[in-house]
Each structure stands twice: as structure tokens, then as C-alpha cells.
Image (cartoon, grey):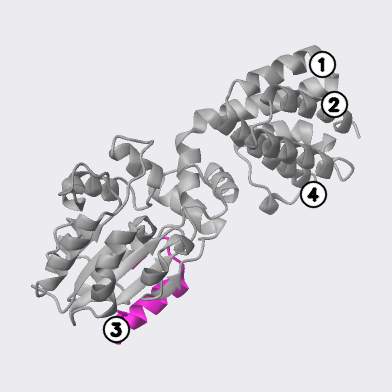
């Protein structure tokens, strides 16, 4: 994994490169950022650059023996630690190394939900247990083999159990001279203070929409217009962008329901709107909230469409086709009220309010505002 293969912001890459070039990489570095912002790939790129024997133009070469070993996940001086399911007291990350390699190989963007799927228990709460800490201590006590430094990359240190964290404190605070820890966190506030205080932190910013769109287009061959629409909606959360891409049928379903709502509201067909609200309520809570978030974005996009400034719009071809006829009905007189109603409905359903009642109330309010 090279720096150029990641979606990390350039400033973070510059800082990491400078640390390594000047032999000032801290013994315990924490890369942290919001969930969905790729960081694990950056940690891997950092370890590869540290070990590369032929760095070129501020990046690892990708061809030296060390880089090839990193690409194959068998660099002897690099190891990984991550949340796992405890089978017995002897369980550690090594029990899940096959799943871990599959996780890293499938995508350069880490997705916690995908990791749960690979563990074959999506309702589980994987943690990093004390036995794993013992394995880390044993591994880091060995001298580095082919490199100046050995590296441990720990994904989600916030999943460390307290007893496991306490066992690592001395090693992290007073490591061996050839030890480097790179911790990768989605929520640094959940890391135990005893661990957090012993790290040097580097926040990884969200990639902007244009960069995510370019990555979707170049890497996954997504149509440029669709990539731009997905990237704008995801707002820098690359995991969300990938989920939107993989659930295209859901997006199409949401669009059809949004169009139906607006047509029925315009006609003020209350009987049909009641049936519509029951259909959306049958989605269950999480999916209904995703639909309402989609509808809120479409109200905003249709309002912006009236400005005739394409650079501000992020629609798929299907959405734009509907907007050419529908957008005149979204204007300065109703856009705020409509968005407020959709937001309120989502908030109420998230709070376990009766979905059918909330959604029918939303539909009735839409009939009022759509003709303003």
C-alpha cells in the first residue's frame, strides 16, 4: 500500500513522510478521524514507507522486497491487531488472520460492518482481549529482522478491554528502541485515557466530494455523474459512498417513493397518501429513516436546480430527469418547511414514535406546502 493508493489528505501524508524521512516517527502514533474516513490504508502505507528500501518521489517504491512483502501481508516486521470474537482464553487475532487478509484485500476502505460480516456474527461486539496484549508483548520483544523498526498496526484501539490496555501500558510508554505502534481510531474519545495520553495524535480529515467522486470513477469505474452525486451525498464518508453504490436498488426504490409522494401530495389524494405512509412504515425504522434522509436531500437538490448552476447540483440522471419537471414546485416559500417536516419525521421515528402516524402526518403537511 503506497501513499498514492490512499484517500488521505495531502497534509497528513506530508507530516508522516517528514516524520519518517527525519527519523522522528513517534513510538506510538494515533491516526484518528470520523468513521468512514479511510485511515487503515494510510497506516499500512506509513509502515510500507518506513520499511521501503528505495523510496521514490515521497512514496514507497512498490517493487523492492519489503514493498512486495507488504503487498502480500507477510512482512516479517509488520503485524496487525484488531477487534475479534473470543472463542476461549487462548483466542487472539491470529485465529482470524485469514478473515483479516480478506478484509484488507477486498477494499482499501475499512468498513466495520463488513468486518462483522466476515466474523459471521453481525450482532457481535468484538473486542481486543488480554490474551492479544500478551501476544503483542511477546512479538514486540523480539528483535526486528530485516528492517530498522518493527511495526504494530492496531485497528480500533477503542475496542481494547481495560485489562488488555493495562497490560500494554508499560510497552507503549517505554517501548523497545525498534518498536513503532500505529493506532487507527474511528473515535478517539472512546480510547482509554491511559492509552490515549501515551500517543502522539494526527487527525485525518474527510476527503472532499470531488476527490471521492474521482476515486469512485477511477477505481470502481462508476459513471462520473453518478459518482459526483454519491460523493456529495456521502459528505466525505467513503464507507457510506460505497454502501450507496452497492445498494443502488434501494436508491431507485427511494426515488420512486419520493416521486409518488410528491405526485399524490399535489393531487391531495389522502386515501392514496395513507397507503403510501403505510408502505414506508413497513420499511421498519432504520430503512424509513434512510428514506427520509434521501427525501430531504432531494428537496434541497430540486431547490438548487432552480438556480440553473449545474456545479451546485449533485443528481443522478434519473433524479435530474424528474427535477426538470418537479423543481419549480420547490421554492423559497416552501423549501425550509418541507425540509423541516422530513427532518422532524426522521427524528420522531428514530425516537420510536408510531411510524404510520408520523408518516401520514408528513404526507398531509406535504400537501399543504407543495402548492405554496
Gap in Å between the C-alphas at discs 4 and 1? Answer: 32 Å
- In the drawing, what numbered circle is on residue 270? 1
Q: Given contact means CB atoms under 8 Å apart, are the residues at marks 1 and 2 in contact? A: yes
Residue 34 horizontal/vertical position (percent): 49, 58
Magenta highlight range: 2-26
Q: Which residue is mark 2?
A: 367
- Please, what is the dominant secondary structure of the magenta stretch? helix
Q: Which residue is mark 4?
A: 307
In this view, the residue farthest toward the top is 271
**Residue 15 belongs to the span the image colors magenta:** yes
Gap in Å between the C-alphas at discs 4 and 3? Answer: 49 Å
Task: Tell me the residue at 17%/62% (across/down).
Answer: 134
Element type at marker 3? Answer: helix
N-terminal label among 1 and 3 = 3
Q: Is residue 151 left or right of residue 326?
A: left
Q: Eyeballing the image, is 332 above or below 358? A: below
Q: Report the front residue among 258 and 138.
A: 138
Badge 4, how many Cα within 10 Å: few under 14, some, many 20+?
few
N-terminal label among 4 and 1 = 1
Q: Which residue is mark 3?
A: 21
N-terminal label among 4 and 3 = 3
- Closer mark to the observer between disc 3 and disc 2: 2
Amino acid at each position: 500500500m503506497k501513499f498514492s493508493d490512499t484517500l488521505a489528505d495531502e497534509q497528513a501524508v506530508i507530516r508522516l513522510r517528514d516524520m519518517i524521512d527525519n527519523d522522528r516517527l513517534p513510538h506510538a502514533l494515533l491516526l484518528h478521524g470520523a468513521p468512514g474516513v479511510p485511515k487503515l490504508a494510510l497506516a499500512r502505507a506509513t509502515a510500507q514507507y518506513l520499511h521501503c528500501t528505495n523510496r521514490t518521489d515521497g512514496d514507497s517504491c512498490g517493487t523492492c522486497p519489503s514493498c512486495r512483502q507488504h503487498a502480500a501481508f507477510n512482512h516479517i516486521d509488520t503485524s496487525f491487531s484488531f477487534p475479534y470474537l473470543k472463542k476461549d482464553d487462548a483466542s487472539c487475532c491470529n485465529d482470524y488472520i485469514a478473515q483479516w487478509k480478506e478484509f484488507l484485500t477486498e477494499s482499501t476502505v475499512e468498513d466495520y460492518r463488513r468486518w462483522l460480516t466476515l466474523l459471521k456474527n453481525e450482532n457481535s461486539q468484538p473486542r481486543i482481549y488480554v490474551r492479544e496484549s500478551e501476544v503483542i508483548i511477546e512479538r514486540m520483544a523480539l528483535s526486528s529482522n530485516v528492517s530498522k523498526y518493527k511495526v504494530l498496526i492496531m485497528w480500533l484501539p477503542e475496542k481494547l478491554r481495560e485489562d488488555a490496555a493495562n497490560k500494554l501500558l508499560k510497552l507503549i510508554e517505554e517501548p523497545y528502541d525498534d518498536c513503532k505502534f500505529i493506532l487507527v481510531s474511528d473515535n478517539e474519545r472512546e480510547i482509554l485515557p491511559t492509552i490515549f495520553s501515551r500517543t502522539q495524535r494526527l487527525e485525518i480529515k474527510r476527503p472532499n466530494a470531488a476527490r471521492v467522486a474521482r476515486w469512485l470513477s477511477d477505481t470502481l469505474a462508476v459513471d462520473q455523474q453518478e459518482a459526483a452525486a454519491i460523493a456529495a451525498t456521502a459528505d466525505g464518508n467513503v464507507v457510506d459512498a460505497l454502501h450507496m453504490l452497492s445498494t443502488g436498488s434501494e436508491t431507485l426504490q427511494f426515488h420512486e417513493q419520493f416521486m409518488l409522494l410528491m405526485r399524490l401530495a399535489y393531487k391531495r389524494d389522502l386515501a392514496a397518501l395513507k397507503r403510501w405512509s403505510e408502505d414506508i412504515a413497513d420499511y421498519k425504522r432504520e430503512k424509513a429513516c434512510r428514506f427520509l434522509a434521501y427525501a430531504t436531500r432531494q428537496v434541497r437538490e430540486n431547490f438548487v436546480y432552480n438556480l440553473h448552476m449545474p456545479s451546485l447540483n449533485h443528481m443522478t440522471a434519473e433524479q435530474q430527469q424528474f427535477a426538470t419537471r418537479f423543481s419549480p414546485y420547490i421554492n423559497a416559500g416552501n423549501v425550509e418547511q418541507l425540509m423541516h417536516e422530513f427532518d422532524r419525521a426522521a427524528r420522531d421515528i428514530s425516537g420510536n414514535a408510531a411510524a404510520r402516524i408520523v408518516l401520514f402526518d408528513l404526507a398531509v403537511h406535504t400537501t399543504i406546502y407543495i402548492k405554496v
